[in-house]
Amino acid sequence: MKFYDIFNGDADGICALHQLRLEQPQDAELVTGVKRDIELVERVAVSAGDSLTVLDISLRSNARAVERALLRGARLRYFDHHAAGDIPQHPQFEAHIDTAPDVCTSLLVDRHLNGRHRLWAVVAAFGDNMVESALRAAQPLKLDHTELARLHELGEAINYNAYGETVEDLHYHPADLYRALMPYPDPRHFMVDEPVFEVLKQAAAEDLARAEGLQPEFADAALALYILPDAAWSRRVNGVFGNRLAQGAPQRAHAVLVGKADGAFAVSLRAPRSRPQGADQLCQAFASGGGRKAAAGINHLPVEQLPRFIAAFRETYK
Ligand SMILES: [Mn+2]
């Protein structure tokens, strides 16, 4: 009988697992990857009696592997906020799934743990760019402005680290990053005692400066589209850059495309913060698309489908 902790490599996935394991320590095999690696359950060779904890990856993308794991006699608990599809009704399947636009997986874990490791849920919500939700969750903790700003920066830094085509693009493997914060019930101590935060903050600032030097392909009051070149820094900064754009123009939808070696694009789409809807449907209309109402993506948009994407983008957010 083995334990597997299967989690998205972004701030939300890492902080969700961290909260659970602070509460209930358990030696488990870690299964994670870059933010776009969401078909993680299938990576596990499941046996009867195994126990899988799955965090912040859509059930829709893992449905077949989950079904197989259940058939083999494993037990699963699943926390997530992405579009789910059908949720298995099975005595060995424990689902905590809520696709409301103002919750992330770490907030679902926080709900499950009655807020016992709230600080890390706040970090995650900031990392998922749910600023209002983060502030709401932080309210009872009575943090001052400086502390909130630091937690915000930490969420962004951990989230930034997850962006890349493969883990080779990243500064830290997400499993190592998780292990670095494991000893810390309080993120404020983590930021002071470990070099990780400063390293990521500095690297993100450098990448961001490059992205901000680019002109958009088009931009008006309703929507804007940027294309970043095929480079490791583009793949890393993509998420932070998108968040920055969304914060700077809350009425506007943003698409950030990153070129790939074969001429295709990776697409990150954010609905306007003032109207966080429609991103999942738009992206699901493409073969490798998926995500949430407020933020979604397409892993591989062939160049010949770019006009179709642009038309759908304009139609959704005109
Ligand atoms: Mn998330």
Image (cartoon, grey):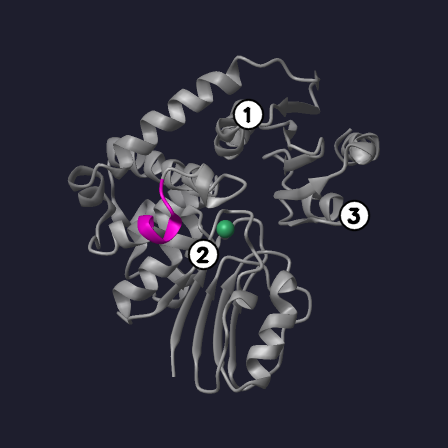
For label 3, count other residues whose C-alpha is less than 10 Å away and answer few (under 14), some (14-19) or many (20+).
Answer: few
Q: Amino acid at mark 1?
A: Leu
- Nearer mark to the viewer, of 3 and 2: 2
Q: Position of residue 199 (x, y in %)?
A: 29, 31
Gap between marks 3 and 2 measured at Cα: 26 Å
User: Is 118 displayed left or right of 229 in the figure?
Assistant: left
Gap between marks 1 and 2 measured at Cα: 28 Å
Q: Residue 285 got which mark?
A: 3
- Nearer mark to the viewer, of 1 and 2: 2
- Nearer mark to the viewer, of 1 and 3: 3
| Magenta stretch in the rendered image | 172-177
Q: Position of residue 209 (x, y in %)?
A: 45, 17
**Vertically, is 30 above or below 297?**
below
Q: Residue at x 65, y 71 (%)?
A: 64
Circle 3: element type: loop
Q: Amino acid at mark 2?
A: Thr
Q: Residue at x 64, y 69 (%)?
A: 63
Is residue 66 visible in this depiction of the protein?
Answer: yes
Gap between marks 1 and 3 measured at Cα: 24 Å
Circle 1: element type: helix
Tag 1 residue: 245
Tag 2 residue: 32
